[in-house]
Image (cartoon, helix red, strand yellow):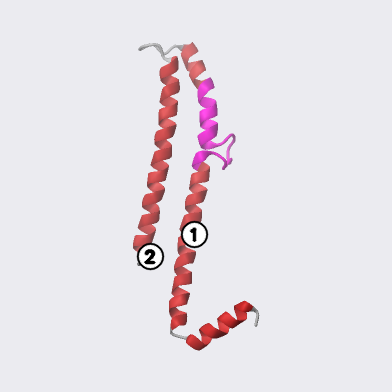
């Protein structure tokens, strides 16, 4: 498989995972707003209660402070970066293995060296 479909697959999985997290965040935020809004009226007290209850949700998804990567979005982004780097590393390993198939003597030397013989 070429690099382009591999990368497109990683992007698609990342996009779906991030969209799922966004939907979850939106659902939780909307539940808070609906709980405090009384009908069509959203007064100062409802706003204050909503902001108070949104704090823990924001901390859960975005982290407790600026640069905090322990939030769900931060962890997801870090995992996606690792997956992309892993894809590139895996592709490089496959490329080296393919090239070594054409050089059996060199492959045996490398294998012997890796065993410490």
Is 60 rendered above or below residue 92? above
What is the spatial separation of the Cα atoms under label 1 and label 2, in whole angstroms?
13 Å
Q: How many residues crowd mark 1 within 10 Å: few (<14), some (14–19), many (20+)?
A: few
* Quadrant of the snapshot with the C terminus: bottom right
What percent of the width, then of the height, locates residue 109? Answer: 57, 85
Q: Determine the residue located farthest toward the bottom in the rendered image.
A: 105
* 68 and 92: which is toward the camera: 92
Q: How many residues crowd mark 2 within 10 Å: few (<14), some (14–19), many (20+)?
A: few
Is 115 rendered above or below residue 55? below
- Residue in view at x 35 percent, y 57 percent: 8
- Tell how many labels: 2
Give the residue pinned by disc 2. Answer: 3
Give the residue pinned by disc 1. Answer: 85
Locate residue 114 relative to residue 72 in the image: left or right: right
What percent of the width, then of the height, locates residue 15? Answer: 38, 47
Magenta stretch in the rendered image: 52-73
- Residue in view at x 48 percent, y 70 percent: 93
* 59 and 98: which is toward the camera: 98
What percent of the width, then of the height, locates residue 105? Answer: 51, 88
Asked if residue 79 is among those painted magenta in the image, a careful observer would answer no
Locate residue 117 relative to residue 73 in the image: left or right: right
* Quadrant of the snapshot with the N terminus: bottom left
Secondary structure beneath label 2:
helix
What percent of the width, then of the height, locates residue 36? Answer: 45, 15
């Amino acid at each position: 498989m070429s690099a382009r479909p591999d990368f497109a697959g990683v992007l698609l999985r990342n996009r779906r995972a991030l969209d799922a997290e966004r939907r979850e965040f939106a659902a939780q935020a909307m539940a808070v707003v609906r709980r405090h809004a009384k009908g069509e009226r959203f007064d100062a007290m409802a706003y204050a209660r909503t902001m108070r209850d949104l704090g823990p949700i924001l901390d859960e998804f975005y982290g407790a402070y600026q640069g905090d990567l322990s939030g769900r979005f931060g962890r997801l982004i870090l995992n996606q970066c690792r997956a992309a780097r892993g894809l590139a590393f895996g592709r490089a390993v496959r490329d080296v293995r393919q090239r070594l198939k054409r050089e059996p003597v060199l492959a045996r030397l490398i294998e012997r060296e890796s065993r410490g013989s």
